Image: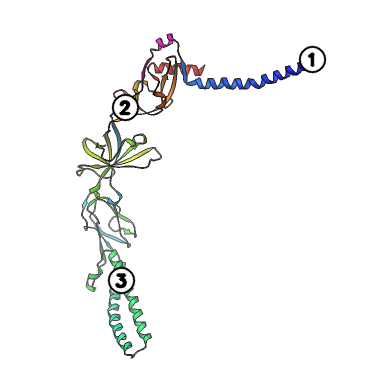
Amino acid sequence: MQQPIIYIAIAAILLSCKAKPAAETENIQEDHTADNIVTLDSLQRRNAAITLDTARIMNMHTTLRASGIVDVPPQNLISVSFPSGGYLKSTTMLPGLQVTSGQILATMEDQSFIQLQQDYLTAKASMEYLSADMERQRTLSEADAISKKKYQQVLSEFKTTQVALKSLGERLRIININPDKLTVGSISRTVPVYSPINGYVTKVNVNIGKYVMPGDVMFELVNPDDIHAAVTIFEKDITSFHKGLKGKVTLADKSGKEYDIETILVTKNITDNRNGLIHCHFENPGHDLLPGMFLNATFEMDNQLALAVPEASVLRYMGKEYIFTTTDNNAYTLTPVTTGRRENQFVQITSGEAPLKNVKIVVQGAYALLGKMKNKAED
């Protein structure tokens, strides 16, 4: 009789041991869930001066400020180099000078230029002889006065020299010598370097007497005809921009003068810094704008419907933004949000909107609730 009683007692103890961790786990979960909730009685509410309001859908209009630089498209930035090595004989270029297409930027000098011209004229003379000789050999071959092999040899030599002449002529054109006008009397040890565009000199990387290697950048030019503003904006604002949106910019060092701009392109990618880029056309750029200048931009954004809460309800805590919400005016929940535009003492909520549509929001006394929550966490 005693043995069954002992078994029952042991089983009860084992069940009790198994149930205990579950109960502890449940308590832990409840405590964890309650970490972001503060409960007040009526006296505490009066002392905290709690005032409530609600989120609302409203038209929001705001001015967005951003910064950027004056920029030009890649095709308007020109690096001038010389395809053949040589010494810089002369130049009058300085940064800021205006240049026109075809203007001489510099003069290069090297003995290799003389050799190239000599080789071309020699090949040209050989071509004239071989052309006449080929005709003679062809006539003799047709009359069976010489072997076909002899004619084929002359024809091969003619074609080889023809290829060499064409190649030498193109090499002369690369260094700005017209082979069609080249004569023995016009052989020169110097050649000009021309500007390919109308624009301005932005950099001079050479000096007289310096040997310039093939491909070295001698000058950098810019064509300001398509100058524009490249403005950096935050990721959260990028969807508010569109083609045609107008704004104004001022230069960082000339804040008194404004330039009207119009958005022409909105970037489709986001940088690692969570920024985007928009390109804006200057409606009247004038002559003061140069690529690389820093600028400040302002845009009058279009009205948009947005979920907004009173600005006073938003708390900043530990680097993030929160609001307190309640459904019964007794328990207040700390709710994380992400904010956007601000207008007339209201702030747009861009994420975390769902929990706000059917609840009340603490406007006054929010920091008192936060203090009580921190004290609760310390306890």
Q: Residue 24 has which mark?
A: none
State yes or no: discs 3 and 2 in contact (Cβ < 8 Å): no
Instruction: Name the kind of residue labelled 3 in the image.
Output: Lys
The mark closer to the camera, 3 or 2, is 2
Please state which of the two labelled residues, at mark 1 or mark 3, is closer to the viewer. 1
Please report the residue visible at 40 percent of the width from the left and 12 percent of the height from the top.
Answer: 48
| Crowding near the residue tagged with mark 3, few <14, some 14–19, many ≥20 C-alpha atoms within 10 Å | some
Q: Earlier in the sequence, mark 3 or mark 2?
A: 3
Residue displayed at 33% across by 56% down: 216
Question: Marks 2 and 1, Cα distance to the nearest angstrom?
Answer: 79 Å
Mark 2–mark 1 contact, CB under 8 Å? no
Q: Earlier in the sequence, mark 2 or mark 1?
A: 1
Name the N-terminal-most of marks 1 and 3: 1
Label 1, label 3: how far apart the Cα atoms are: 120 Å
Say whether residue 331 is visible. Answer: yes
Determine which quarter of the picture holds residue 193.
bottom left
Residue that mark 1 sits on:
2
- For the point 32% across and 24% down, the residue is 346
Q: Which residues are magenta?
A: 39-54
Disc 1 is placed on an element classified as: helix
Q: Which quarter of the rendered picture does the N terminus lie within?
A: top right
Total labels drawn: 3
> Which element is circle 2 on?
strand
Query: Disc 3 marks which residue?
Result: 166
| Residue nearest the observer in this picture, 269 or 174 | 269
Q: Is residue 17 above or below residue 180?
A: above
Determine the secondary structure under disc 3.
Answer: helix
Residue 342 is labelled as: 2
